[in-house]
Image (spheres, coloured by chain):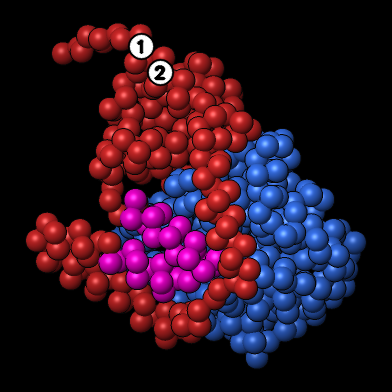
Amino acid sequence: MELAYYPGCSLKASSEIYDVQCKRVLSAIGINLHELDDWNCCGATSASKMDDFLAIAMPARNLGIADASEYAELVIPCSACYSRMLVAQKVLESNRSLLDEINGELSNKVIGRTRILSILEAIRPVVNSGDLAQRVTRKLEGLKPACYYGCMQTRFPYGVTVPDDVENPQGMETILETLGATPLDWSYKTDCCGASAAVNDNETSITLMSKIMKDAIARQANCFVTTCPLCQLNLDAYQEKVRTTYGIAQSMPVYFITELIGVAVGLPPKDLGVDRHFVDAMVLLRELNLYE
Amino acid sequence: MTTVLEFRPDQASSLAGEVMARSGQNLNACYQCRRCASGCPVGEETGYVTPDRLIRMIVLGKREAALDNPLVWKCVSCFTCGTRCPNDIMTARIVDTLKKMAKEAHVPPLSPRVAAFHDSFVAAAKRVGRLNELEFMGRYEWKNTLRSLAKLKFTEVFEEQKNQAGLGLTMLRKGRMHFRIQKIKGKQEFRRLITKGGERARDLSKSPASQE
């Protein structure tokens, strides 16, 4: 399968390991990613709080580039980028004058032909066809993940079509079951980690994360799994502070879904940057004999 | 003690009208069921002002209260309110609209750090077309430092720098900090789009057309 790929700024900076993983792991399961040429920042949630036009125009330039590419589908692993691009496409679909205004300045015009996929949607066909199960060389036995979706995989500020259950999504669970793990039912999978609040309103964010951690631990999870670079960074980098502030004894590695797929299909964890987490993410893999 | 509401029809309709048009949300449809309030993750932090009460304030024409309250600054844009609303009112979008209206009306932000964050993010992304985390955090911290210095709060500056330096060092150690500057080749096109297109659309953004 050949897909256009929008990494977004975070995957070129603090979450570079996710960029590496997306390319390597997806190609190992038969999905080849082609990075959009000269993409720009989507504006994230900040643009929508500052300027209505920027919030649509910034993702629009990328939509134009994707529409001009040879690929029918575009995968966007970062939840914030995914949400903003979907929203921009939706708004431009029904607002002709804004579309003309924006297209007037673009060399690659927005046509609206590209189908935008989350990383879970991109992987789903490989799971459904049985391909993924066949490629598994190391079953993730003993792994009990709390799959954490955060906000932007299933909730959108505009009425876009949501590809999973809004309050109880199953995309990650389906993949992890295929890999031999035992994902757990829990209550905070779509709760908010605070996202940018970790930087600008740290206390609020720490409180939100403490609730997420407490529930995951109460369900006896031994790790988090996420698809969003901001959720991953927050739960990982601020976990020590959450634990000391709220007296939580247990620590939990926070994996990207791509890392666990990679391990299951036999890619070396260090090549994927699993050793570059804040909370040690190698120990659990070693304990479960998932790599030598 | 009960406060008697002073009803000023002119103010009520103009405020509600402006917020509805700019946010694209039909506030008249709210029947105060409070599903938004029960799902709001920052409900414990915003005190009296829950999403339903914010809507009520706007409908009642309480402009000052609507532009200057904790929910406008504590909202984490998780979109739970609107996802659960039986009438499809996305209060998070109302909050974004109020942030913009507060800025235009020169109401000082209740949380200057949140305002500085979004300002710095957009400024950094606009400059080269991509967000460089170091530039963005630099701009953001600079704003915070200046504000603290202006108020002669030197300990605040020290604490802030200490916290950020701590996180920065860990990121550096884990190879998660990047010094290579990302920028786009189509900078001219990008700049033209956001400035020229932006000017024309500025009026558009005040009409509901840009919202739906």
Residue B175 in sight here: yes
- From the viewer's perspective, is residue B209 above or below residue B180? above
Considering the numbered disc 1 on the image, is that residue within a helix, a strand or a loop?
helix
Tell me the amino acid under the disc marked 2. Answer: Ser
Q: Colour of chain B?
A: red
Q: Say whether residue B150 is left or right of residue B197.
A: left
Disc 1: which residue = B10
Quarter location, residue A24: bottom right
Q: Which mark is residue B37?
A: none
Give neighbour class at mark 1: few <14, some 14-19, many 20+ (Cα, 10 Å): few
Q: Which mark is residue B14?
A: 2
Q: Is residue B33 visible?
A: no
Picture residue at 70% right of the left edge, 43% below the top = A100
Give x and y (percent) for residue A107: 72, 60
Q: Amino acid at mark 1?
A: Asp
Q: Secondary structure at mark 2?
A: helix
* Image: magenta residue range: B115-142
Q: Are marks 2 and 1 in contact (CB under 8 Å)?
A: yes
Q: Distance between the Cα atoms at labels 2 and 1?
A: 6 Å
Residue A80 belongs to the span the image colors magenta: no
Residue B150 horizontal/vertical position (percent) = 14, 59
Q: Chain coloured blue: which letter?
A: A
Front residue of A30/A56: it is: A56
